[in-house]
Amino acid sequence: MSLAEGMGAVILAGDRGADDPVARARGTRCKALTPINGRPMLMRVLDALDDRGDFDRIVICGPRHEIASTDHDLQKRLGADPRLHWIDQGPSPASSAAAALDEISAEEPCFLTTADHALLDPDLLASFLDRALERREDVVVGLARLADVHAAYPQSRRTSFKLRDAAYCGCNLFLLRNARARRAAAFWRRVEDLRKKPWRVAGVFGPRALLGLITHSLSLPRALELMGRKMGLSIGAVVVDHPELAVDVDSADDFLLAEQILVRREGGAR
């Protein structure tokens, strides 16, 4: 795909408000606007996307606009960049994703990520997205090898699934190539409550997937084939070379780890 063709982007920025563990620990009104090494997480993700010239529409799905409006830098950015569009979050991540995707043309590819991907920068984004755009599957997901994450960040605790060749964890990086890929958001609604219980998620995908997960006998391509068959689409994966792409900010401990990485990368607070 050439840069001239255009591409949409969705940033899921919803959270549980003051009850979110990161927002509560840092004393902010929502997680997405929590500064980390001096810059709100959501703004960091927008910075990463800004470096590319192929995003023609970026939909942010986050907390109620009256909460978002308290961040003056964000409001200034929303007003100055016609590509940016804000919608309020839905009752669940899957419903938020579906609503945000409705704001993007189904005829063009769409990149989807989360606002708590605080370590995302232009180079890390390119390391996933450039490889994903070379593939031809309807949906491409970013994965990291759990061994690589543990080697780089032994203190990090990540949800993972073990396959025949390795254990993998998600990176909250997705490319939805076409209209057919939108089925993934609808299917996500069925399994989102089970995402911390991989064996039950596998059960939704059928007995072969469940047995393969229990016995660790599935290869990654075979696992993706079974998932895609259930959803009526094709799924591919980019196994990233940068373990920090698996570090999102779900907890206070995650926040401290991400901030340590950013301090090493950028120096002290901006």
Image: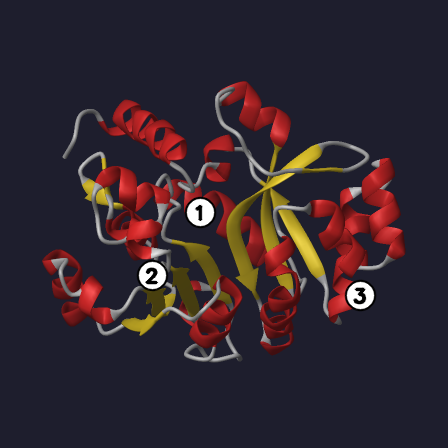
Residue 42 visible in the picture: no
- Front residue of 157 and 138: 157
Q: CA distance from mark 1 to mark 2?
A: 12 Å
**What residue type is disc 3 on?**
Arg
Q: Which residue is mark 2?
A: 53
Q: Earlier in the sequence, mark 1 or mark 2?
A: 2
- The image shows residue 45 at horizontal and vertical percentages of 33, 51
- The image shows residue 122 at horizontal and vertical percentages of 35, 45
Q: Which residue is mark 3?
A: 229
- For discs 3 and 2, the disc positioned in front in the rendered view: 3
Q: Which residue is mark 1?
A: 126
Q: Earlier in the sequence, mark 1 or mark 3?
A: 1
Q: Earlier in the sequence, mark 3 or mark 2?
A: 2
Residue 219 visible in the picture: yes
- For discs 1 and 3, the disc positioned in front in the rendered view: 3
- Front residue of 201 and 131: 201
Q: Is residue 216 shown above or below 72? A: above
